[in-house]
Image (spheres, helix red, strand yellow):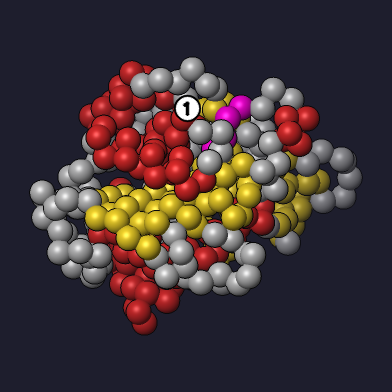
Amino acid sequence: MKVTNNLVVLVLSGWIAVVPAFHGTTTTKVRRRPLSPLYFHESFVDYNPLSADTFHEVQLNGCQIAKDEDSLTTIVTQWNDANHSIVIEAKPLEYKEGDSNLFGHLVRRSRKDDSDDETSSSLPGIMLVHTEAGPLDSYLFYKADCLLQQFNAVVFICDLFSDPYGWGWSDDRSNFNDVCTSLVAEDGKLLQDRLLASTTAFCDTVSEVDPQRLAAVSWGLRGRPLKELGNIIPSEDQFQVKALAAYQQTNVHGGDDFHITSTTEDTDDTPPSTGKTPNGGTFLNYGKNEDNEESWKSVLQLIEKELF
């Protein structure tokens, strides 16, 4: 607490509150840092409508959501051309792994009123694991919409980097390299911990999600996150990840990630492989450059078969 010019400045849980030191009742709250590109809404802790129009510029409320204007235009065009007859909504979810804050987003079909939540108390949950660009990627929100046009579920864009700003897009890869080195050190312990924290936060926070009907889709990082997620053996009845699909794309800055071990010796024409994970899920594994309409249909078929 600091007193300056008859004002008391309090910093509480990420908020800055400025109040008169000796009298008055007015309190002004200012967010110290943007944690989501969706924070232009007045009620930013609640669900708000989400569409391609939401992402109208690369830097949105202090968060970078695409590599550049051309990339964003490509994604927005794909989004607008896709079926979006069902209205969707999203909100940020901040959660913890150890002492680290992680910054995800929940996306679902729009609710007409509060009573709809009660009638949708057992929906499948689908986790989206980000690329080397991090969790603030407009492409992930577009894919969340694609999933929700197909399935009545809740989608969780999780965070492995602890990235509230979109620093994963930076051309300076030093922070990215440090984070990824930490993630895969000690046989991927931190990566496993953050995946477990993400899955647990998803199931514990969203009451409408059925923890026994989970799926996960990942892009980039050589498929390593879903390999680790498939190796996590949850405690009895904690959760069940029944379907996992990994795209092993090269990173958005070109080249491969030297510190991320691939799940296969993949090449550009590596066919998709399937198998069972140690925790009983079905794993669909794609090689590089296979994120296309045909492969996406296979992902949708896998999710439908395992969760519905």
| Quadrant that contains the N terminus | bottom right
Between residue 22 and residue 183, name the one nearer to us. 183
Q: Residue at x 15, y 58 (%)?
A: 266
Q: Is residue 192 left or right of residue 266?
A: right
> Taking 23 as reference, is 69 above or below it?
above
Between residue 155 and residue 233, name the one nearer to us. 233
> Taking 142 as reference, is 276 above or below it?
below
Q: Which residue is mark 1?
A: 149
Q: Label 1: few (<14), some or many (≥20) within 10 Å? A: some
Which portion, as a residue range, is magenta? 106-110
Q: Work out whether residue 281 can be spotted.
A: yes
Q: Quadrant of residue 137?
A: top left
- Residue 84 position, x and y percent, is 45, 20
Q: Residue at x 40, y 20 (%)?
A: 83
Q: Is residue 276 left or right of residue 200?
A: left
**Secondary structure found at label 1:** helix
Q: Main secondary structure of the magenta part?
A: strand
View extreme (front): residue? 305
- Residue 188 position, x and y percent, is 37, 74
Q: Quadrant of residue 152?
A: top right
Callout count: 1
Q: Amino acid at mark 1?
A: Gln
- Residue 240 position, x and y percent, is 54, 59
Q: Is residue 108 magenta?
A: yes
Q: Residue at x 59, y 48 (%)?
A: 93
- Residue 102 position, x and y percent, is 52, 58
View extreme (bottom): residue? 186
Q: Residue at x 65, y 40 (%)?
A: 45
Q: Work out whether residue 170 can be spotted.
A: no
